[in-house]
Image (tube, rainbow, N blue to C red):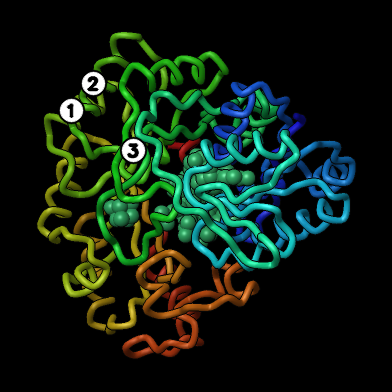
Amino acid sequence: MRVLLVFPPSRVGGCFRGDPELWPPLGILYLAAVLEREGHTVEVIDSTILTESQYEARVTSINADMVGISASFGQIKSALSLAEKMKDRRIPVVVGGPGPSSMDPGLFLKRCTYVVQGEGEETFIDIARHIEAGEMPPVPGSFTYVEGRTVCPGERPLITDVDGVPFPAREKLPIARYLDHWRSTYPKTVTSVLSSRGCPFHCSFCSKTVFGRKFRARSAKNLTDELLIIEEMGFDRVWFVDDLFVHDRKRVREICRTIKKERIDLEWACQARVESVNSELLSLMKSSGLICIAFGVESGSKKIIDWYNKGFTLAQCRTVFSLCHHMNVATHAYFIVGAPVETSHDIELTKAFIKEINPTYALFSVLTPYPGTPVYSQYAPSSDLDELDDAKKSVIVGQEHAEKKREEMEEFYAAFKAGIGEKPLLLGEI
Ligand code: B12
Ligand code: SF4
């Protein structure tokens, strides 16, 4: 079958070359790889690297037996509008990704044949097999309409053998255009890689609807084989987009040793929890190419850290930032303002804490209740597409901050960022 996979435009960045940093749509590249392994012919439309008119031209001339659309939150409307066009042409449409995985499937089913929730690889090839055979039965891991009723025959179990998943089909993208963009913007070229899936922690703002809570990691050998291909493609650096790169320290040590043994000439950055690294591990990571490590600190108030269910202490944050400073590893700290119980005193504590730990880079966000997260179920069950599609609007909708109302929050956030001095991390520039 001819399968077309689309990464549609987003209203919150990551499309039409609008962002300084361009990340490949890894989700559809994984799907492309498993579909090709099954013998299908796959084409990809990636709005990240196209102009708006190029994207429109590509979707107007679609010629496929089946279309798969990927959607995160800013892409819901553009995904639905594309699905509508395909429905008019009677092409079966499957939608998946972080958006549909967290939302009511009914929002999509009027225009899509299947809505896939969670990891897409196995469910999508299952659906493709049925569509090729001219059937559209209910398939585990997805929702479909049967006689006007929404049917889901059960969840798809998480993939256990993640080494068995083929590498994302990066060759489906115009890699030279990605590299040109990075070269014309920064001294270094960077791309993203997924080395593990899942995270067992329970932070209240974080979504687990795609990869779940069970940590499943690729082996050092499998990962470094992909890194060698990326180096060959001409990239200088890699961003590991795993929820939790440093979870199994033994695996991280093996990865670092294999990178050194294979003489892989790539620098890299990753995310970790503050309590997960120690000096021995950090030293090994640095010697194998680590240039920056990101930690979700969130707040300088223990009360707020506990409200987010982070499960660490401020002392652990202090220790890890001081360790990174000593070892000359750049740090990136994420902070969130806007917890409903947060007071001016908590904000002052956060400001002082930022000064104390002195991260190299810092990113501030306003607490946003994304569907599929504990804060969403508690504070903002909304099926309003405008709210969901525009991350900035979905700040604790209709709720009051301990001292500030919703309307004051954006203003306060801007002043907070200006006062503290946001230091955005640009991975091509470190
Ligand atoms: C890199 C990244 C970005 C990049 C996007 C780059 C890109 N081209 O993808 C940038 C910085 C632009 C970004 C922005 C945002 N992001 Co982001 N991002 C990530 C991150 C760290 C990695 C994404 C990735 O490559 N994953 C690896 C691929 C393989 O996973 P995947 O895309 O989910 O694909 C799998 C399934 O979803 C499914 N699938 C995907 N597409 C399709 C299509 C079909 C047809 C099918 C059947 C299945 C399917 O199968 C895939 C393989 O199993 C994830 C965290 C994570 N670990 O995934 C957060 C994450 C996806 N982002 C998130 C959020 C909230 C956002 C923003 C809304 C933030 C904001 N306030 O602006 C925006 C939305 C942008 C948008 N596109 O609309 C959340 C989504 C929350 C949720 N409920 O699911 C995540 C999960 C982080 C989190 N844990 O909270 N993001
Ligand atoms: S914020 Fe990080 S540690 Fe917490 S649940 Fe999400 S991925 Fe896991």
Q: Residues within 10 Å of mark 2 (few under 14, many from 20)?
A: some
User: Where, by quadrant of the figure, is residue 215 drawn?
Assistant: top left
Calculate the distance from the C-alpha at mark 2 to the C-alpha at mark 1: 6 Å
Q: Amino acid at mark 2?
A: Glu
342 sits left or right of 415 in the view: left
Q: Nearer the viewer, mark 1 or mark 3?
A: 1
Q: Amino acid at mark 1?
A: Lys
Q: Disc 1 on helix, strand or loop?
A: helix
User: Where, by quadrant of the figure, is residue 106 drawn?
Assistant: bottom right
Q: Disc 3 on helix, strand or loop?
A: strand
Q: Which label number is shown at residue 254?
A: 2
Counting from the top left corner in percent of width and height, residue 239 is at 43, 35
Instruction: Compare marks 2 and 3 and give the one earlier in the sequence.
Output: 2
388 sits left or right of 239 in the view: right
Q: Is residue 260 above or below residue 171?
A: above
419 sits left or right of 408 in the view: left
Q: Which label number is shown at residue 292?
A: 3
Q: Residue at x 31, y 21 (%)?
A: 220
Counting from the top left corner in percent of width and height, residue 268 is at 38, 30
Q: Which label number is shown at residue 107?
A: none
Counting from the top left corner in percent of width and height, residue 241 is at 42, 40
Q: How many marks?
A: 3
Quadrant placement of the N terminus: top right
Q: Residue at x 39, y 70 (%)?
A: 419
Which residue in the structure is indicated by mark 1? Answer: 250
